[in-house]
Image: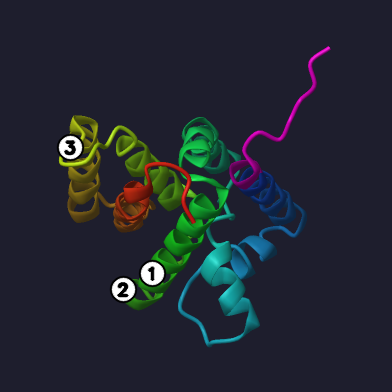
Amino acid sequence: MKRIHYNSPVILTFFFLSLAALALGALTQGWTTQNLFSVYRSPAGPLFFIRLAGHVLGHSGYAHFAGNMVLLLVVGPPMEEKYGSRALLAGILLTALVSGVLQCLLFPGRALLGASGIVFMLILLSSLAGMRAGSIPLTLILVAAIYLGQEVYAALFVKDNVAHFMHLVGGLCGAGLGLAVFPGRGKAV
């Protein structure tokens, strides 16, 4: 009989923490989602610093959670295998902090939550997977053109409850991480 193994520790832990945040939000009628797993400009204090990184674990409901987690579970494990757990964890934390700080500075009256920025970080990171010295992968150009173009358009012209700007931030963090660890062409950090 085959046994199940925890094949992607960072991605799976992120998934289970997000699932716990969703369950806590349901149990507390949204209190934990608003106060621990959403970031917004507020006085600096212990909860603010938890929210600054923890907002990527929060989701507005099951549909939001499922949409992000399916992509995370598909794209994340190969990236964790290629770049290493520590590099991927650093990328997730950096993306969470950058998007949290930018949200507070640029959109002070609005809350941000969800793993979309992390997912888009992974998507751009994966498009760099075939990078070789002296060349740029065509997949990177195509993904960047389609994805970035769509998100720029949506950020400028679509009025919805989606943080399109933070998707761009996540994508840029992923591209930056991929370029930063490229010289080692494998597991880094």
What is the spatial separation of the Cα atoms under label 3 and label 1, in whole angstroms?
27 Å
| Discs 3, 1 touching: Cβ within 8 Å | no
What is the spatial separation of the Cα atoms under label 2 and label 1, in whole angstroms?
5 Å
Kindly identify the amino acid type of the residue bearing the numbered disc 1. Gln
Q: Quadrant of the N terminus?
A: top right
Tell me if 24 is positioned left or right of 97 in this view: right
Tell me if 57 is positioned left or right of 175 in this view: right
Seen in the picture, residue 165 relative to 51 is either above or below; the reply is above
Q: Position of residue 151 (x, y in %)?
A: 25, 47
Q: Residue furthest top?
A: 1
Tell me if 136 is positioned left or right of 129 in this view: left
Give residue 36's mark: none
Crowding at dot 3, Cα within 10 Å, few <14 / some 14-19 / many 20+, comes out as some
Kindly identify the amino acid type of the residue bearing the numbered disc 3. Ile
Q: Earlier in the sequence, mark 3 or mark 1?
A: 1
Q: Which residue is mark 3?
A: 141
Q: Position of residue 53 (x, y in %)?
A: 54, 66
Tell me if 140 is positioned left or right of 2 in this view: left
| Discs 2, 1 touching: Cβ within 8 Å | yes
Q: Do we see residue 173 in this rendering?
A: yes
Q: Position of residue 186 (x, y in %)?
A: 43, 42
Residue placed most toward the observer, 33 or 165: 165
- Judged from the image, the secondary structure of the residue bearing numbered disc 3 is helix
Residue placed most toward the observer, 108 or 115: 115
| Residue occupying image coordinates x 22% and y 45% | 148
Give residue 106's mark: 2
Q: Which residue is mark 1?
A: 103
Asked if residue 94 is among those painted magenta in the image, a careful observer would answer no
Which numbered mark, 3 or 1, is in the foreground of this view?
Answer: 3
- Segment tinted magenta in the rendering: 1-12
